[in-house]
Amino acid sequence: MKKIFYTLTFILILGVMFTGAAFAQGELPTDDEVNAVAHQLYCPVCQNTPLDVCPTDACRDWREQIRGMLAEGKTEDEILQYFVDQFGDRVLSAPPVSTKFNWIIYIIPPLIILAGAIILFRSLKEWTTPKATEAAAVEDGSGSSSPSDDYVARLEEELKKQK
Amino acid sequence: MIAEFGYGIALVSFIVAVYSIVAAVYGAAAPRKSASLVESARRAMLLTFPLITLSAAALIYLLVNNHFEVSFVYEVTSISMPTYLKVTAWWGGQAGSLLFWSWLLAAFASAVTLRKWDRDIEFLPWVIMISSVTLVFFLGMVIFYENPFTRFWLVNGNVEPHMFAPANATVFTPQDGNGLNPLLRHPGMVIHPPMLYLGFVSYVIPYAFAMAALITGRTDDRWIRLTRRWSLWAWLFLSFGLVLGGRWAYDVLGWGGYWGWDPVEIAAFMPWLTGTAFLHSVMIQEKRGLLKHWNMILVILTYALVIFGTFLTRSGVLSSVHAFANSPIGPLFMTFVSATLIASIALVIYRWPDLRGETEMKSMLSREALFLLNNLLFMSVLVICFWGVIFPLISELFTGQKVTVGPPFYERATAPIFAALMFLMGVAPLSAWGHSTLKTLGRAMWKSALAALVVTVVLFATYTKNFIALIGFFLIALVLLVTFQEFWRGTRARQRSQKENFFTSLSRLMGRNRRRYGGYIIHISMMLMAIGILGIEIFQTSTQGSLAQGEALDISGYTIKYRELASWDDQGKGVNFTRASLDVYENGIYLGELNPRIDFYFDSQQNMTIPGNRSTLRDDLYILLVDWQPVSNMGATFKIFVNPLVNWLWIGSLLFLLGVIFAAWPDRDATEETSRRGVTRQASQASAAD
């Protein structure tokens, strides 16, 4: 396999040297086809950079490797799998759900958000429905909201006038 | 000599800051309270600013004058760099940026302690204490771990970095420095970090007041009123820092985008999320006296995320393209964040009963209820971001397997939440404080909703059949129309009652309700940005190809013809430029020439890819030079992006800036701070104005 790859790159280089535009002709996959696969992969050396835009030499070699594999007729999934086998899960743009552990990345956020939503709606309900017990407290004027509001408002009006 | 001076002054300011903590706490909490001791703490606090300024001046002197015997200077500058870049190299590396952080904090804390305190004197010692604790932490980092004044010494033939001369050592001065990372030499990068830092540091002030309120037990909304402008400015700086970072990425990182969901970007985005939630929820406390616990928690979270963010950008624990630095200060940062977080939350719990709401919520559709929903959504985005950032660490810790959490994760998880937020932006301005019903909301909304639907149908017929894009455009249209309707409604109401002409009414209306209308301007700007984001995220097309001279490539109606390539050295700048010339045609009409280039910096041995970009309101044609053959007439490889509508992102961010400045601008009349009840009445008048 490696041999084929080297021959292919050799042909490629020769092609480029002699015609200047060998990419467009022949059987070789185009840059766009290579990038479509590379875009789903993350550079194994420089983290957080998709392989299709990574400018390092190592990444250039990997892109040529993808080109070679595409030329061999490998499918996209096979190529991705090959890179995962070589470098581990981190070449994928998101953790794969193939391992049980990785499930938590997809489960925890919805759970927390759901919990937040439940807390919010419960407290909203609590706030919006007048409570019998507290209504009683309001009766004797201690926890009252609206009467004291008016009172404070009037007080502030008075204060303002005095200024 | 200068290095020792700078270090010595930093050490003195550290001691002064420690003193101000002790004096403030002792003056306020000792059995016999001592106002003079607090005053002494205040003066000590004030003294830190000129001291750190001196220390920074020493560092800048070393940077500008090529003192490469100082290791920090060696790392971030080189002889060929222009002077202004040597100055800004101050925050181009870890040690310098920690000093920069301290300097900003000292400036802000001093500014705060200079205000009139008469009504709030009991807050003063605690505000000093909190700011000084933060300052001491950062100065401590500078002095003990990340010293920018460390010099190289020749010890028995080896070069070692030390602050003070080891025995039998002589100073070692390298010929030239490494030079600043070329990516950081972009004008956007010159102002992006200070903007972010300004935002980060300003959030320390609202936090300090919140803690002061908790400690003194004065838990009404005074602290919020005192820090309202601070949090707005903080938010402005943070937002603008984020936008500048995006623009910088678009211009120099060479991947055709502006936001890559990189951990460091997210680190700055997280305090923005809590800060934005805070901005909305404080209004509920001011107007309705609700949510006191929640506002405390939000400001505490923001502070923790600010420190966490500084730590993420600086520690390299989560290595990313931004993490230019690696250092042992990570654990210290984590300890500090955890300690302050735990202490603050403990204080909130201690004061829990005092923070009960003063009124009740009357309706699930009232504005305060919708604001709460907005908070839930912002927190959801925060949860996703935080989890995405730390999951690789968790995974590595438990399974040994490193994983990448990249854009697909964040995009899929946050897109529906952002859509919901946009919907809220369309509804909430129409709901009243206190209570609203479906009926009142529907009556206020139906015209805008209908018009937005018409816009969407037109777009469906003429522009796109993409379902997600159409939902996005519908929401954008809805928010814009509702917001314009709000301007119209308020102005008409005022016009009727005050008998003014339309524009006088509009400007007076806005001038009297700066926060409200500033907020609406910000909503409009967000929608313009959303247009840009939808455009580039959904409609971006790209292609890559190698062209020989004279050959052309087609993409989205454009024809790009490769003319020539030139490569030359600029010895003065220490850069090799390789620049391609391409002619751009659209449907056969010549549009002009684009020049993507690659700059190679000799001192740091690094490339910088500068795109050739033709930018219009409709789309950007963005071309990158990827590769070229040694003999230039043979060919070169280009990557070409067409980014529709992306310019609206930048237009939106400029409008955004105006909106925040409008909202945060000091009122002419400082006594206008009306009480909560007064404001409630005004607000209900305004929203009942139709």
Image (cartoon, rainbow, N blue to C red):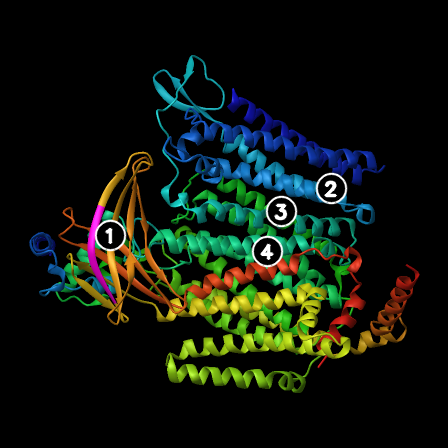
Magenta residues (range): B559-566
Q: What is the crowding at mark 4: few (fewer than 14 residues within 10 Å), some, or many (at least 20)?
A: many
The residue drawn where x is 80% and y is 67% is B678
Comparing labels 4 and 3, the label whose residue is closer to the camera: 4
Pointer 2 or 3: first along the chain: 2
Distance from disc 4 to disc 3, alpha carbons, whole Å, reads 21 Å
Distance from disc 3 to disc 1, alpha carbons, whole Å, reads 53 Å
Q: Which residue is mark 4?
A: B235
Distance from disc 1 to disc 4, alpha carbons, whole Å, reads 41 Å
B564 within the magenta span: yes
Q: Which residue is mark 1?
A: B580
Comparing labels 1 and 4, the label whose residue is closer to the camera: 1
Q: Seen in the image, is B375 located left or right of residue B556?
A: right
Q: Which residue is mark 2?
A: B114
Q: Which residue is mark 3?
A: B340
Chain letter of mark 2 equals B
**Same-chain status of marks 2 and 4:** yes
